[in-house]
Image (cartoon, rainbow, N blue to C red):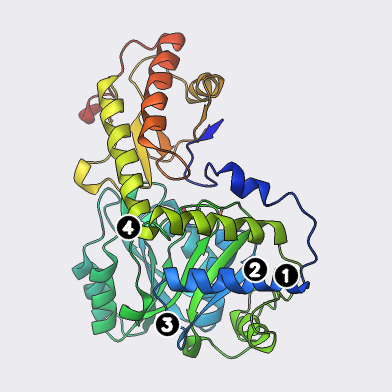
């Protein structure tokens, strides 16, 4: 079965095989692995060993985002978040429920946020200290222009929290060149092609609020940094998903062997191009303009045919070896296909054939979307 969801992704047999062992999380051997993994992801982030630390946190990406919000933005602190889609909405909610004050900027979700819009919002409100950015908005597939947004944040003397969960490892990131970024969040199970169960937050050490300010011991990055320093980064405060960490180390070996971020991005771009061409060939229409379509995930308009049913389509695809998301992400009905994971353009070509057969089996005749005026 090939997972074409934008995370957790299809992984290699060798990566999954690393989980088939019992591990004592405080054991010296595991400490080495855990320390190595943290160094490796700090290097991928472009963070400098003097100024940046990669902090691991058990759980999912949203836990990492909540921890970052609580640990660099003070209680009541104001953070500007462009509403780029459902992942931005989640950051807004996490901030609000943590007692921080999100300021929502409405934007066109079908293209990247123009950096002057961020500059204007910051100029209009000097009480905003931070900008929250979702680098790759996984609900739409749009990628933000991170250097451009970073430049306006820097120029305005503000700080940034970066949700890089579906970007990290594939899209360029250089924290040393973007000192305005206080924290960048990602997980093992997206573009780095590991398994789910652990998040990482790469932080600027000097930007963490004092221990206790997070008002959550579990999510206090200052406490995690303190622990890392005391133990030389080898252990976790509480039981980690040790097998996931071990498997991630192997996933990083394959990342290096492939040629790192640029090679991974090139493969995902090739996946995206093959998927786009294939969908158009079988009569379907992607939701975004090509220029706005990122290499992580693609939404494709549902066919305008009474026989269309997303749940049925998902079942038909599964019978042919592919799993896609079984929910709508866009206002208009669409289906969503991930371009990331241990997959190649050949898999995308096979997916296209499977989708073609699935639609035929469902009796979908008209494959184009409804005319724009009726949407
Ligand atoms: C996957 C993802 C997350 C985290 O999702 P979890 O289910 O909490 O791991 C956060 N932001 C973006 C943009 C994502 O793609």
- Residue 174: give x, y in percent of width and height: 34, 73
Residue 332 in view of the camera: no
Closer to us: mark 3 or mark 1?
A: 1
Residue occupied by mark 2: 33
Quadrant in which the C terminus is drawn: top left
Q: Nearer the viewer, residue 57 or 74?
A: 57
Residue located at (38% from left, 53% from top): 137
Q: Secondary structure at mark 1?
A: helix
Is 16 rendered above or below residue 316? below
Residue occupied by mark 1: 29
- Callout 2–callout 4 Cβ contact below 8 Å: no
- Of label 3 and label 4, which has the lower sequence position? 3
- Callout 2–callout 1 Cβ contact below 8 Å: yes
Marks 2 and 3 sit apart, C-alpha to C-alpha, by: 20 Å
Residue 372 falls in image quadrant: top left
- Of label 2 and label 4, which has the lower sequence position? 2
Q: Secondary structure at mark 4?
A: helix
Question: In the image, is the residue at mark 3 within 8 Å of ligand 1 by its beta carbon?
Answer: no
Residue occupied by mark 4: 262
Q: Secondary structure at mark 2?
A: helix
Is 254 rendered above or below residue 4? below
Residue occupied by mark 3: 48
Q: Secondary structure at mark 3?
A: loop
- Of label 1 and label 4, which has the lower sequence position? 1
Q: Nearer the viewer, residue 329 or 161?
A: 161
Q: Residues within 10 Å of mark 3 (few under 14, many from 20)?
A: some
Marks 1 and 4 sit apart, C-alpha to C-alpha, by: 31 Å
> In the image, 284: left or right of 251?
left
Quadrant in which the N terminus is drawn: top right
- The disc placed on residue 101 is none
| Residue placed furthest toward the front | 257
């Amino acid at each position: 079965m090939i997972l074409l969801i934008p995370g957790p992704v299809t992984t290699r047999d060798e990566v999954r095989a690393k989980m088939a062992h019992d591990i004592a999380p405080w054991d010296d051997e595991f400490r080495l692995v855990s320390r190595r993994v943290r160094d490796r992801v700090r290097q991928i982030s472009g963070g400098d060993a003097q100024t940046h630390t990669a902090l691991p946190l058990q759980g999912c990406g949203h836990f990492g985002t909540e921890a970052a919000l609580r640990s660099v933005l003070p209680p009541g602190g104001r953070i500007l978040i462009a509403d780029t889609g459902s992942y931005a909405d989640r950051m807004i909610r996490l901030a609000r429920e943590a007692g921080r004050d999100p300021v929502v900027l409405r934007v066109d979700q079908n293209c990247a946020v123009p950096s002057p819009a961020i500059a204007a919002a910051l100029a209009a409100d000097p009480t905003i200290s931070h900008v929250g950015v979702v680098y790759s908005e996984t609900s739409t597939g749009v990628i933000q222009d991170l250097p451009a947004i970073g430049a306006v944040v820097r120029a305005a003397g503000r700080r940034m929290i970066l949700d890089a969960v579906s970007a990290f490892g594939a899209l360029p990131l250089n924290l040393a060149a973007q000192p305005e970024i206080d924290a960048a969040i990602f997980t093992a199970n997206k573009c780095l092609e590991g398994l789910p169960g652990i998040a990482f937050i790469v932080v600027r050490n000097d930007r963490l609020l004092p221990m206790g300010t997070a008002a959550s011991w579990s999510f206090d990055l200052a406490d995690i940094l303190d622990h890392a320093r005391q133990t030389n980064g080898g252990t976790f405060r509480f039981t980690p998903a040790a097998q996931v960490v071990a498997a991630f180390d192997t996933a990083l070996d394959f990342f290096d062997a492939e040629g790192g971020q640029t090679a991974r991005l090139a493969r995902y771009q090739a996946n995206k191009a093959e998927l786009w061409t294939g969908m158009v060939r079988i009569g379907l229409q992607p939701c975004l303009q090509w220029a706005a379509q990122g290499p992580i995930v693609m939404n494709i308009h549902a066919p305008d045919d009474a026989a269309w049913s997303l749940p049925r389509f998902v079942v038909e695809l599964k019978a042919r070896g592919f799993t896609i998301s079984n929910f709508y992400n866009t206002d208009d009905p669409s289906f969503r296909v991930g371009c990331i994971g241990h997959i190649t353009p050949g898999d995308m070509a096979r997916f296209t054939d499977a989708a073609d057969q699935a639609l035929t089996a469902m009796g979908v005749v008209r494959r184009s979307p409804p005319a724009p005026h009726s949407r």
